[in-house]
Image: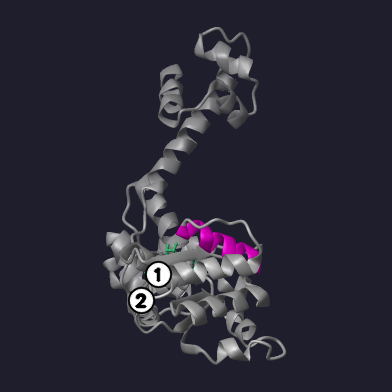
Amino acid sequence: MIRDLTELMARRNWSQTQVARAIGKSPTVINQYLHGKYPGDMASLERDIAALIKREADKEKGKRLTVAFVRTYTATRCLEVIRLAHLDCDINVIFGDAGMGKTMIMRQYALENPGAILLEADPGYTARVVLEEICARLGLNRRGNMHELSDGIIGALRDSGRVLLIDEAENLPLRALEVIRRIHDKAGIGVVLAGMPRLIINLKGKRGELKQLYSRVGFALALGDVLPRQDIDEIAASVLDDAQDPAVGEALFTASRGNARRLFKLLRGVHRHSQLNGVPVNAGAVRKFSEMLIN
Ligand SMILES: Nc1ncnc2c1ncn2[C@@H]1O[C@H](COP(=O)(O)OP(=O)(O)O)[C@@H](O)[C@H]1O
Ligand SMILES: [Mg+2]
């Protein structure tokens, strides 16, 4: 048992303190244990340590499931909309529910096209932050007022043939959207905004303040809140061989409700279960596991 614990610690690069914390004991106890000098209730301590080792081993098995990007029908359509913005220097929009694959697609485009500048907005993204982020990407000085930053960016991007991709753009306040429109207009570069459905409402401006921006949008691709069955099948089959079984595919589609994020959680859960028990994944296991997912 001491050996198993030392192995785990080496694998994870864990200190004695980290082990102690994980099982709710003091570092001294762990140190004594590792030196074969623990004076307390050995059986009870070893039970806790065995449980920790088992838990960590289970985690490692479950973790083996990784997703690589799959060029589904939805992904292909989105990539095309991004490419058009890039080629035609338009502003295009992709909107849909969480878990439709927007972030993965934006990252994939950026990976395949080094000229793309990808920003992932969060609720703290003010106009100033947007400008500073773009400056950072372009290696420009971030000091100066907003106008100076904006002009610097426009100078650097004009006729560059680059494209600006902004994910989670529903987080951008009106002023940030205006800043982006100005860069698009003056530098003549393509822009893609991806986000949740309320992005479209924001783009119009609650009182129509952003008419200028909205009128510039070329394509607005609506992904809705359910991916096609074929997409779900392809993603599932790419990570789990058992998903090729039509009954499993059917169960996965139903249980995922066409949502790729939910699908991934299901896949990870049933995969782990099947690994631990040495049994193939079946439709029953998918349904059982889906009952445990909150959303
Ligand atoms: N094209 C795809 N190929 C493989 N997995 C995907 C794909 N699209 C989505 N997924 C899965 O769904 C999860 C959620 O996708 P994400 O891009 O974060 O969605 P969104 O940004 O629309 O909320 C991903 O982490 C991945 O597991
Ligand atoms: Mg996302």
**Depth check: 190 or 34 in front?**
190
- From where the camera sits, is residue 103 visible? no
Identity of the residue drawn at 36% across and 54% down: 66
The residue carrying mark 2 is 79
- How is the protein colored in the picture? one colour
**Residue placed at 62% from the left, 19% from the top?**
27
> Could you tell me the amino acid type at mark 1?
Ile
| Magenta stretch, main secondary structure class | helix
The part of the image, by quadrant, that contains residue 209 is: bottom right
At horizontal 62% and vertical 14% (from top left) the residue drawn is 28
Mark 2 and mark 1 in contact? Answer it, CB < 8 Å.
yes
Instruction: Say if the magenta span includes residue 134.
Output: yes
203 or 64, which is in the foreground? 203
Which x, y percent locates residue 103? 46, 67
Q: Which residue shows up at 55% across the image and 60% down it?
A: 133
Q: Disc 1 beta carbon < 8 A from ligand 1?
A: yes
Measured as percent of width and height from the top left, residue 203 is found at 60, 84
- Quarter of the image for the N terminus: give it: top left
Cβ of mark 2 under 8 Å from ligand 1: the answer is: no
Q: What is the magenta range?
A: 125-138
Q: Amino acid at mark 2?
A: Leu
The residue singled out by tag 1 in the image is 105
- Between 12 and 2, the one lying in front of the other is 12
